[in-house]
Amino acid sequence: MEASNASVYDGACAAAEACEMCRDRKRSRILVSESVDPKVLSVIRTYAFGRDVQVDLVPAPGGVTDTDALPALIGQDVSCLVVQQPNYFGCIEDLDVLTQSVHAGGAKIIVHCNPIAMALLKTPGECGADIAVGEGQPLGIPLSWGGPYLGFMATTAKLMRKLPGRIVGETQDTEGNRAFVLTLQAREQHIRREKASSNICSNEALCAMRAAAYLAAMGPEGLRKTALQCASKAHYLQKELEKAGLPPVFPDRSFFHEFVTECPDAEKLLTALRAEGILGGLPLEGNRMLWCATEMNTREEMDRVARIVREVTDR
């Protein structure tokens, strides 16, 4: 995309700030797909509450956003739709169709994306999205018991002046040397508070620098190899878990490195996995579990998980 900024706390804050970028006097209502991470939705709602903005959900039957129901939900008061790619259930959304539908209704689309997955999938920019946001933690940043993390934002030139952070531009000094300067500053510590579009006061520059070093070291081909490792290992794990007695909930959906299976007794299974030093999946409502595999997982580790599952399910 044409402009980017990495100076927000995390991916959830980036999504909430992006919603504010889309709001104007006539359009303020926010649509969020039910397939978006609940934690991201929670932060969006917190921001919206303080601004007296309505947030409505778009149904996601079958694991992805309902493209048929979307046009009827986009009224003249809707400012934007927030979708996730891949989504909370690991499924891959049809961004081309969603973008066309949202733009036809006069609204903007915000895509909360996994940066590693973008090495394989069609990017938000290629699909015509207005704003792309996400969590930069996968870009070489350790988990660190919950942070600090890195929210990234990218947008079009048309929306560049609404970015909530600091935009650095390239220029020349008085001697003609290459130099950089803060070109746009939208935060309350730089301008009159009543004119500020954001009150975020911290700068995630250390995390941004680490992510930049990671990207420089990996390069395009390294990122692609990492993404392929994530996808291939996740698909291997999904097949092994299915053999062990945990069938997929969305068998016809494409996924990247996360997927949902049925799981009748999640606590029993997670206890068995913990006993062998393995962090299992995330329990979801309806006896389901969200699993994830990355480039860091080995085949031996995944086979151990499948063996434990088989023992617990007596398959």
Image (cartoon, rainbow, N blue to C red):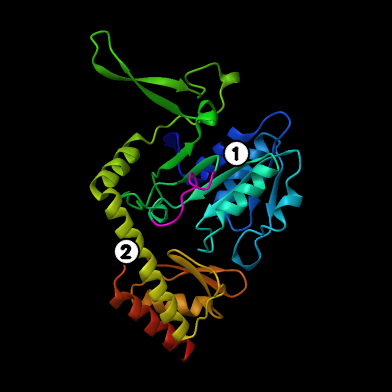
In percent of width and height, residue 246 lies at 50, 81
Image location (x, y in percent) of residue 93: 55, 58
Main secondary structure of the magenta stretch: loop
**Is residue 77 at least partly visible in the picture?**
yes
Give me the residue at 54% from left, 69% from top.
Answer: 253
Residue 135: x and y, percent? 44, 47
Q: Are marks 1 and 2 in contact (CB under 8 Å)?
A: no
Q: Which mark is residue 295?
A: 2
Q: Secondary structure at mark 2?
A: loop
Provide the secondary structure element on which disc 1 rests: helix
Instruction: Tell me which residue sits at (66%, 49%) in the image.
Output: 101
Q: Which residue is mark 1?
A: 19
Quadrant position of the N terminus in the picture: top left
The magenta-colored residue range is 120-128
The crowd level at tag 2 (other Cα within 10 Å; few <14, some 14-19, many 20+) is: some
Near mark 1 (Cα within 10 A), the count class, few <14, some 14-19 or many ≥20, is: many
Pointer 1 or 2: first along the chain: 1
Q: Nearer the viewer, residue 287 or 96?
A: 96
Residue 89 got which mark?
A: none
**Residue placed most toward the observer, 247 or 195:** 247
